[in-house]
Image (cartoon, rainbow, N blue to C red):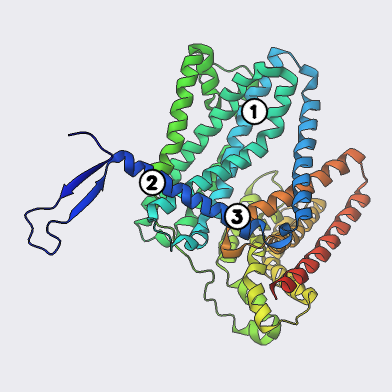
């Protein structure tokens, strides 16, 4: 009998209507090929979703806006790279300086990977709503989960590349191709190992929690656990940096383990470790299952009848934000962050812990716009925007007041508290603007990531140029106010344009 891709099995010895029917059982090679093919089909489907829903909606549907956003991101990367090249130029060509830069970069790669993993997992917690559009396809839930895993990994990789771009390019510019092995051992391999450990741990914990009474709340629980992991990693950085700069013994700093393997066992050992790392990084996505992608409810039934009587026409904006599941999760996180900052010695202002409360602004416009196009089609865009802004500040204000009082009673510097208050208020403007410019339809996290990347690039470039020009404090404050006014104006114009386009 010759080997074929499928094995034909005829059912026999059964008295049923299907007796004699021939069934086909796929061979392992065919099954693997089909699984990969279906996963790629889902990825292409999600690529079309990205183009048509994320990029093709909002301000990015304009070619000029897309080019402008791309130019801002490129300017951000170019500025960061130039600054990194200047900072390390004095030691260009020296092997000692090169090794020091590379070993310190190993810490940066680990931190960037952990932070990117946390951001992606928090935003992808609601991927079930986005992936609901694939339910009509002839695919299994396992294949759908695998596609989400690939999307997770690709997004994390993109964030790490952007974060490490300036350091990596400046190292190559100043030290040449001799830095490539060091970049592989000190940047690429530690980042891959960090992602593999975090992904395996996250999947195992997710599966364990799904089988307990805490299953419905497993995503917020995992987000909090991941945050404390990242916080612990961040707090260990000064100790690890001191160990690196003091010429440590081999295999005593875990982020340099691959660097030490290369020094003591040579290139073949490093190549073998790299291959093993690549296989292990793909193992969670391809082999380990995850819990089902649930489509969770957006809102929690809080008794807010008084809002309807007090705010009347503006009540939907307040109710949608106050009853949002995102607002509830953000309130819990903010309370924890405020307490954490308040109990730390020489920590930043407790007001910075209120930042998560502004997350709801990302979803406000996408949630409310369809309703108001139907019931209040003639509502001015400016009034619609002001209602969203008022609801956002009404949600943030109680926690903000508590954090300010904590700063007052703990004797925190007044200027630091004022700066933090301005930062939180500005974050509320930015989250609403991101939700307007690139609406997060179906609660998809891709719109949020793309919008935040663009806003971060623009903001960073402005801050860098303010530092280069050595603007006084009054000029910087004036520039911030002008930027806020322009952001509000453009948000209102975008709301008006999108409502006209929807008609």
Q: Position of residue 205 (x, y in %)?
A: 41, 48
Q: Is residue 306 left or right of residue 254?
A: right
In whole angstroms, how far apart are the C-alphas of marks 3 and 1?
33 Å
Badges 3 and 1: C-beta atoms under 8 Å apart?
A: no
Q: Which residue lies at the image location 78% right of the left edge and 36% below the top edge?
A: 78
Mark 1 = which residue?
105
Comes first in the chain, label 3 or label 2: 2
Element at badge 1? helix
In whole angstroms, how far apart are the C-alphas of marks 2 and 1?
38 Å
Q: Position of residue 251 (x, y in %)?
A: 50, 20
Q: Is residue 286 left or right of residue 270?
A: left
Q: Which residue lies at the image location 59% right of the left edge and 49% below the top edge?
A: 119
Q: Which residue lies at the image location 21% right of the left edge and 33% below the top edge?
A: 2
Mark 3 = which residue?
50
Q: Is residue 357 left or right of residue 425?
A: left
Element at badge 3? helix
Comes first in the chain, label 2 or label 1: 2
The numbered dot on residue 360 is: none
Q: Residues within 10 Å of mark 3 (few under 14, many from 20)?
A: some
Q: Nearer the viewer, mark 2 or mark 1?
A: 2
Q: Nearer the viewer, mark 3 or mark 1?
A: 3
Q: Residues within 10 Å of mark 1 (few under 14, many from 20)?
A: many
């Amino acid at each position: 009998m010759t080997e074929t891709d499928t094995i034909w099995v005829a059912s026999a010895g059964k008295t049923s209507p299907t007796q004699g029917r021939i069934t086909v059982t796929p061979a392992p090679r065919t099954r693997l090929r089909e699984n990969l093919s279906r996963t790629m089909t889902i990825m292409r489907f999600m690529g079309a979703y990205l183009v048509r829903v994320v990029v093709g909606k909002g301000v990015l549907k304009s070619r000029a806006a897309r080019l402008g956003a791309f130019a801002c991101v490129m300017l951000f990367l170019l500025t960061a790279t130039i600054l990194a090249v200047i900072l390390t130029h004095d030691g260009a060509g020296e092997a000692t300086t090169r090794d020091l830069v590379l070993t310190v970069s190993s810490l940066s790669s680990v931190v960037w990977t952990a932070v990117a993993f946390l951001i992606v997992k928090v935003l992808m917690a609601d991927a079930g709503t986005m992936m609901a559009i694939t339910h009509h396809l002839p695919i299994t839930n396992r294949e759908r989960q695998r596609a989400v895993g690939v999307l997770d990994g690709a997004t994390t990789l993109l964030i790490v590349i952007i974060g490490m771009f300036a350091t990596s390019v400046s190292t190559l510019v100043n030290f040449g191709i001799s830095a490539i092995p060091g970049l592989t051992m000190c940047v690429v391999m530690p980042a891959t190992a960090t992602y593999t450990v975090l992904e395996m741990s996250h999947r195992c914990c997710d599966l364990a929690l799904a089988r307990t009474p805490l299953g419905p709340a497993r995503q917020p629980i995992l987000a909090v656990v991941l945050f404390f992991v990242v916080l612990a990693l961040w707090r260990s950085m000064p100790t690890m940096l001191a160990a690196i700069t003091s010429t440590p013994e081999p295999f005593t700093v875990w982020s340099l383990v691959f660097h030490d393997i290369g020094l003591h066992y040579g290139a073949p050992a490093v190549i073998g470790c790299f291959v093993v790392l690549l296989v292990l990084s793909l193992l969670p996505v391809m082999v380990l299952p995850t819990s089902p992608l649930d489509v969770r409810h957006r809102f929690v039934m809080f008794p807010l009848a008084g809002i309807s009587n007090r705010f009347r026409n503006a009540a939907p904006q307040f109710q949608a934000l106050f009853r949002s599941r995102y607002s509830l999760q953000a309130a819990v996180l903010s309370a924890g962050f405020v307490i954490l900052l308040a109990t730390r010695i020489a920590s930043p202002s407790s007001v910075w812990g209120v930042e998560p409360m502004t997350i709801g602004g990302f979803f406000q416009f996408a949630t409310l716009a369809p309703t108001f196009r139907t019931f209040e089609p003639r509502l001015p865009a400016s009034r619609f925007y002001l209602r969203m802004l008022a609801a956002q500040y009404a949600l943030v204000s109680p926690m903000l007041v508590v954090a300010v009082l904590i700063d007052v009673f703990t004797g925190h510097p007044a200027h630091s508290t004022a700066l933090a208050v301005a930062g939180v208020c500005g974050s509320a403007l930015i989250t609403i603007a991101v939700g307007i410019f690139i609406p997060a339809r179906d609660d998809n996290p891709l719109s949020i990531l793309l919008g935040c990347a663009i806003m971060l690039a623009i903001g960073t470039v402005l801050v860098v140029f303010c530092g280069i020009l050595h603007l006084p404090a009054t000029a910087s404050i004036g520039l911030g106010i002008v930027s806020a006014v322009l952001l509000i104006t453009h948000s209102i114009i975008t709301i008006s344009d999108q409502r006209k386009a929807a008609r």
